[in-house]
Image (tube, coloured by chain):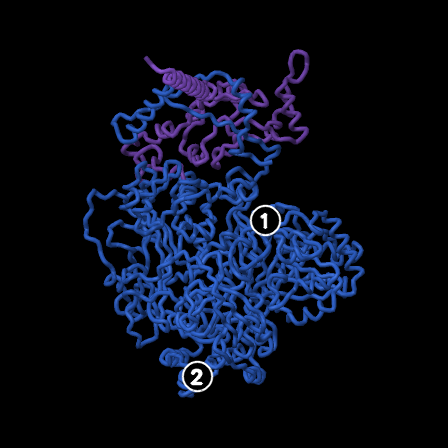
């Protein structure tokens, strides 16, 4: 009924199709694999620093370490010297009396005057110009964008930080008597492009 | 170690993390708006297709980057926050005050120091472009000996040993040297008396300085005060382009031409006469212009003097003899008569000493010294050495030749410097790049950039400013003065002559501290020094009495006036952007159009249309210019307004070494023609030979059309018209039919950003263009792409010309995105990449742009720029060049449209700062880059909703109008028509000439 040549072509086409599906499927699996998604990104850090302990139990203010959040565009991560302000004295040991792995790494860096290379958890695209100080001055809490950090044993990216997620807040309508309306603002934050992209 | 926000991807690390990362706790859903808008529709479609393809909506890419902590964070330096340093720009002929912006430890933008009395916050293109030179990948990275890298110690010991053995040492420096540099040269010469110091420069004003020294009996320079003069006469002096303290000249010139609508009936502005040989930027701003050959300058000044003394025939005779426009010259005589003590005459630095002596006497007779002319006994530059003297010394063979920051192999006047170097023993070249000189020398040493150097300057008596490093040298470079200090110390056996200073920083500091304490500025030397660093130095010049003129000496000098002979004369001028070639490796300056001819990446022989006809040469035909046996081939450029029989060309092009940019730039070295006719007047030649070679080299212009074709684009009027009716522009405009298809947006709340540009103040210097380029990460595209009309400047200066060759009117008009309320670009964008902000900005969102170019097509002002190629590709790949980018502005890639944003990064920054502090945003807090650079203060940016803002007042000015108003696009850039103070009897209505004269 079908010529041999035609059959060969059908098999070839089927083969290509199967290969394409396999390729596309594995790409899909790779892209959608939970750890490859932005929300929930929780990389292993060089020091198993616990926000739950420091910010939650010890109630150290966020701004003690992320000192620039109120003053500049970047919240900044603490210098090794900032860690050492406490850890000069506080040096946790395990039951055998040895320094814990994290403390040892910290002291090592301090001794060698080497910076700590952390894995960036919150990372906006390069064409987004975000300013921490503006959001702090507008009375946002850190948790609104970073999640309940004080309960995190390991830092993770709580929200995906997509543009639509930013706009969810920025688009909230202001009440009629809000003073910001005098500045021509009708929503909680500006929603025009150059507010963030330039 | 700095904190990196956004470094490189670490793929190994990423793979490791991929395996180890914990499972997510949240999976984001994306929100779908209630109403089905176009956006919503697109998003839904995207989601649906993703779902179809992959089974789950949305796909996200996880960024995996590092963030590096500091070990100990400095108190003042925070990531992303700018720090400002005051300094001095020492690369040009006049040292200006600087404020340098550094972010994350790297300087990214230069502004003028507002406290500096000379430039008062303004900056020039060359100052702006200094940032690019700092990060120039072609910079010499280590000392070289015969092509091999050597250590500084090895180079120093060889040089010191050679100097110790030598009987004749020649030190060649540039003419602009600071007090500390002069002191170390003196010390060097005291330690080794066999050193002879020569000064080499091709764009010097030595003929003028020599004349002044003779007739005033003291060394110094005349300072014109254009704001105090009613009548300004410029004889071939490009005061607004390259001659003298240009930034101060432009400012004072435009101050003398400010208009106030309230008193328009009595309006008084200065009148500029230019008598010049080629069309310069100054000539393009003249109210009355006379085309003159260089050889006729002396005669005209004599005629002016005679006429001013009451001889009515002198000027008539002069005009008749040379065929000059008599009416204009007679008008000039009348004006000088009527404005005694309120006029001033300046002559170009390339004219012979006799002309300057004559001009000095004319000024004296007009009673200008002390009123419109000031005196500065301490010029920033040294007079240059006669090249003949240097040749005589080097011809006998010097043991050591040291070239500090000069490039004589490239620009030795008329001669061959390589042969002279060959006769000497050890030759040392010290420069930023490996140029013609340093590659011909036995040892070449890398110089540090101005922004990496300690230095000082004294441009005016009592005005001493400091230059401080803003970054450590990027390469193994050392500044020239430090090298001299090291050699001096070694030669003196390690003993410091004055005090204990070990390095150049200490040397400068110690001199300053001693001086500050001696002057009683402070008892505490350390505090006084810190204060000087913060403010920029001692920034109050002393006032100096004008010296009296020795009439007998001056008369004797005038008597020697040489007269011109021959059909053609040659004038060699500094290039308006790259000067004598020192900035030739700077792409921003190569691609900055010449403000008059609009030529980029090239130098040309500029001739008048009449001369071109005589020669039978068309634009681009190469002509060979021969002077005294030396010949140079240059392409012809026909420029209306050039004097018939005069060929003008510029220095600085035709480099053979010194970096990729300057070597790739076309052009011809004009230096072989220097001084071949008369060594005392190196940049002028009479009786030159011209011959068509038959070759062709097309000069590339960024503006090909010079006529407005009668359309009201750059408007102007005469002073009489303005006095009669301040709103004279309204008769020239085509007003739109008041028809809006849609309800206009209500901008009355909050801010409404707007700009006003005063065409009466703008002289077309183009500093704004480079300032914009530096601020907004604008790429250069190269000569070929410029020829295709693909230059990327967000701001350009449109130059139009109309009138006859003898009465040519030139218009300069800065053109940038007009941020129209009814922006035609916005409605045609299929992806909403360009939109309007509630504050009146026309926004361009690069990450949305798909590059259809519809917007550019629909823009009536043609101010949108498209990235046809990866113009930034090389810069992004190079770790050094990459540092020059402004981190506040996105670097655009291929296929993306871009345009002026009104410096939205500056707006946002100032707005957020004010909001954070709950302060009112004051008028003037936000300055766009162009506004900040402008020496004429022609550009004003602000909030049009604030009735007290400068921009709101200018928008309401009687002279205000919009370009292409008839289109009803409602632009937010308001232009103020120019008022020309043309000589009376001139019935030109201006701005309406149909057709116009074409270059």
- Coordinates of residue B799 in the picture (x, y in percent): 37, 60
Q: CA distance from mark 1 to mark 2?
A: 56 Å
Q: Quadrant of the N terminus of chain B?
A: top right
Task: Say which residue label 1 marks.
Answer: B138
- Coordinates of residue B901 in the picture (x, y in percent): 38, 45
Crowd class of label 1 (few under 14; some 14 to 19; many from 20; radius 10 Å): some
Task: Say which residue label 2 marks.
Answer: B308
Q: Quadrant of the C terminus of chain B?
A: bottom left
Compare marks 1 and 2 and give the one earlier in the sequence: 1
Q: Colour of chain B?
A: blue
In the drawing, does residue A166 fall left or right of residue B511? Answer: left
Query: Camera-side residue: B786 or B982?
Result: B786
At 30% across and 44% down in the image, what residue appears?
Answer: B825
Q: Colour of chain A?
A: purple
Marks counted in the figure total: 2
Observer able to see residue B55:
no
On screen, residue B756 above or below B372:
above
- The answer as to whether the residues below labels 1 and 2 share one chain is yes
Report in which chain the residue with disc 2 lies.
B
- Coordinates of residue B685 in the picture (x, y in percent): 53, 74
């Amino acid at each position: 009924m079908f010529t041999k040549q035609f059959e060969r072509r059908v098999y070839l086409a089927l083969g290509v199709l199967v290969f394409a599906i396999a390729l596309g499927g594995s790409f899909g699996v790779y892209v959608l694999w939970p750890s490859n998604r932005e929300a929930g990104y929780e990389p292993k850090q060089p020091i198993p620093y616990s926000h739950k302990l420091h910010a939650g139990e010890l109630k150290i203010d966020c701004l003690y370490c992320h000192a620039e959040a109120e003053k500049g565009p970047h919240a900044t991560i603490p210098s090794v010297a900032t860690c050492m302000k406490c850890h000069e004295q506080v040096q946790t040991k395990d039951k055998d009396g040895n320094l814990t792995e994290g403390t040892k790494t910290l002291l090592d860096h301090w001794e060698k005057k080497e910076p700590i290379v952390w894995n960036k958890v919150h990372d906006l695209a390069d064409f987004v110009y975000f300013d921490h100080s503006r959001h702090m001055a507008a009375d946002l809490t850190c948790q609104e964008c970073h999640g309940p950090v004080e309960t995190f044993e390991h830092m993770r990216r709580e929200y995906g930080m997509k543009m639509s997620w930013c706009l969810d807040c920025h688009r909230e309508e202001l009440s009629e008597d809000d003073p910001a309306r005098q500045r021509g603002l009708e929503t909680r934050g500006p929603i025009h492009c150059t507010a963030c992209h330039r | 170690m700095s904190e990196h926000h956004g470094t490189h991807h670490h793929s190994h690390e990423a793979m490791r993390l991929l395996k180890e990362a914990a499972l997510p706790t949240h999976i984001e859903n994306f929100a779908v708006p209630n109403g089905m808008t176009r956006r919503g529709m697109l998003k839904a479609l995207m989601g649906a297709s993703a779902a179809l393809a992959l089974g789950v909506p949305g796909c996200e890419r996880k960024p995996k980057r590092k963030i590096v902590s500091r070990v100990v964070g400095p108190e003042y330096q925070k990531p992303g926050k700018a720090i400002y340093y005051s300094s001095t720009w020492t690369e040009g002929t006049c040292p200006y005050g600087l404020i340098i912006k550094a972010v994350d430890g790297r300087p990214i933008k230069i502004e003028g120091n507002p406290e500096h009395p000379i430039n008062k916050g303004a900056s020039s293109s060359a100052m702006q472009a200094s940032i690019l030179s700092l990060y120039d990948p072609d910079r010499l990275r280590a000392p070289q000996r015969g092509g091999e890298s050597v250590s500084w110690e090895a180079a120093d010991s060889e040089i010191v040993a050679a100097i110790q053995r030598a009987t004749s040492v020649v030190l060649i420096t540039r003419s602009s040297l600071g007090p500390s540099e002069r002191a170390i040269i003196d010390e060097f010469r005291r330690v080794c008396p066999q050193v002879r110091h020569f000064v080499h420069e091709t764009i010097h004003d030595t003929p003028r300085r020599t004349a002044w020294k003779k007739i005033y009996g003291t060394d110094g320079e005349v300072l014109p005060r254009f704001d105090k003069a009613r009548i300004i006469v410029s004889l071939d002096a490009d005061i607004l382009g390259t001659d003298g303290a240009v930034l101060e000249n432009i400012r004072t010139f435009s101050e003398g031409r400010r208009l106030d609508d309230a008193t328009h009936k009595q309006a008084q502005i200065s009148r500029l006469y230019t008598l010049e040989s080629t069309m310069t930027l100054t000539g393009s701003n003249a109210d009355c212009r006379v085309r003159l050959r260089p050889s006729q300058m002396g005669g005209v000044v004599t005629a002016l003097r005679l006429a001013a003394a009451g001889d009515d025939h002198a000027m008539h005779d002069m005009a008749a003899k040379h065929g000059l426009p008599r009416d204009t010259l007679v008008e000039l005589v009348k004006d000088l008569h009527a404005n005694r003590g309120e006029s001033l005459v300046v002559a170009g630095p390339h004219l012979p000493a006799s002309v300057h002596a004559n001009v000095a006497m004319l000024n004296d007779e007009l009673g200008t010294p002390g009123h419109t002319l000031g005196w500065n006994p301490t010029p920033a530059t040294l007079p240059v050495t006669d090249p003949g003297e240097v040749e005589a010394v080097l011809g006998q063979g010097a043991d050591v030749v040291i070239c500090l920051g000069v490039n004589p192999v490239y620009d030795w006047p008329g001669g061959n410097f390589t042969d002279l170097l060959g006769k000497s023993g050890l030759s040392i070249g010290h420069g930023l790049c490996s140029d013609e000189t340093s590659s011909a020398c036995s040892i070449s040493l890398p110089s540090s950039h101005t922004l990496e150097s300690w230095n000082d300057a004294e441009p005016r008596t009592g005005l001493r400013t400091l230059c401080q490093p803003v970054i450590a040298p990027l390469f193994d470079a050392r500044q020239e003065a430090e090298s001299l200090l090291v050699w001096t110390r070694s030669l003196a056996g390690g003993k410091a002559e004055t005090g204990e200073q070990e390095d150049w920083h200490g040397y400068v500091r110690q001199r300053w501290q001693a001086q500050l304490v001696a002057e009683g500025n402070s008892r505490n030397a350390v505090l006084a020094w810190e204060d000087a660093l913060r403010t920029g130095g001692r920034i109050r010049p002393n006032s100096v009495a004008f010296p009296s003129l020795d009439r007998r000496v001056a008369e004797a000098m005038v008597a020697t006036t040489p007269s011109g002979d021959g059909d053609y004369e040659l004038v060699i001028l500094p290039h308006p952007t790259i000067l004598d070639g020192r900035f030739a490796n700077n792409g921003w300056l190569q691609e900055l159009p010449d403000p008059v001819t609009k030529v980029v990446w090239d130098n040309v022989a500029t001739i008048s249309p009449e001369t071109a006809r005589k020669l039978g040469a068309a634009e681009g035909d190469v002509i060979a210019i021969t002077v005294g046996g030396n010949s140079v081939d240059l392409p012809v450029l026909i420029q209306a307004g050039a004097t018939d029989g005069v060929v003008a060309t510029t220095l600085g092009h035709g480099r053979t070494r010194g970096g990729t940019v300057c070597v790739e730039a076309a052009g011809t070295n004009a230096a072989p023609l220097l001084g071949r006719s008369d060594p005392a007047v190196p940049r002028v030649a009479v009786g030159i030979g011209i011959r068509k070679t038959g070759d062709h080299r097309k000069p590339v212009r960024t503006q090909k059309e010079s006529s407005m074709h009668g359309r009201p684009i750059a408007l102007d009027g005469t002073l009489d018209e303005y006095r009669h009716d301040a709103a004279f522009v309204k008769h020239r405009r085509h007003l739109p039919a008041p028809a809006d298809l849609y309800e206009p947006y209500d901008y009355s709340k909050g801010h409404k950003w707007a700009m006003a540009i005063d065409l009466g103040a703008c002289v077309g210097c183009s500093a704004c263009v480079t300032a914009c380029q530096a601020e907004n990460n604008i790429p250069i595209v190269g000569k070929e792409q410029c020829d295709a009309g693909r230059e990327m400047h967000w701001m350009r200066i449109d130059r139009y010309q109309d009138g006859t060759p003898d009465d040519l009117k030139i218009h300069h008009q800065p053109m940038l995105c007009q941020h129209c309320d009814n922006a035609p670009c916005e409605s045609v964008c299929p992806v909403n990449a360009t939109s309007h902000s509630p504050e009146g900005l026309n926004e361009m969102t690069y990450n949305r742009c798909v590059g259809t170019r519809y917007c550019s097509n629909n823009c009536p002002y043609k101010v949108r720029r498209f990235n046809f190629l990866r113009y930034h590709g090389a810069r992004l790949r190079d770790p050094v060049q990459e540092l020059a980018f402004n981190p506040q502005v996105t670097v655009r890639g291929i296929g993306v449209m871009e345009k002026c944003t009104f410096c939205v990064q500056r707006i946002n920054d100032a707005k957020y700062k004010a909001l954070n502090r709950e302060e009112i945003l004051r008028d003037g807090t936000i300055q766009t880059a162009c506004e900040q650079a402008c020496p004429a203060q022609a550009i004003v940016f602000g909030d049009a909703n604030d009735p007290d803002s400068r921009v709101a007042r200018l928008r309401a000015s009687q002279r205000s109008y919009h370009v292409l108003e008839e289109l009803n696009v409602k632009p937010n850039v308001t232009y103020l028509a120019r008022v020309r103070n043309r000589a009376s009897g001139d019935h030109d209505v201006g701005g309406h000439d149909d057709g116009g004269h074409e270059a």
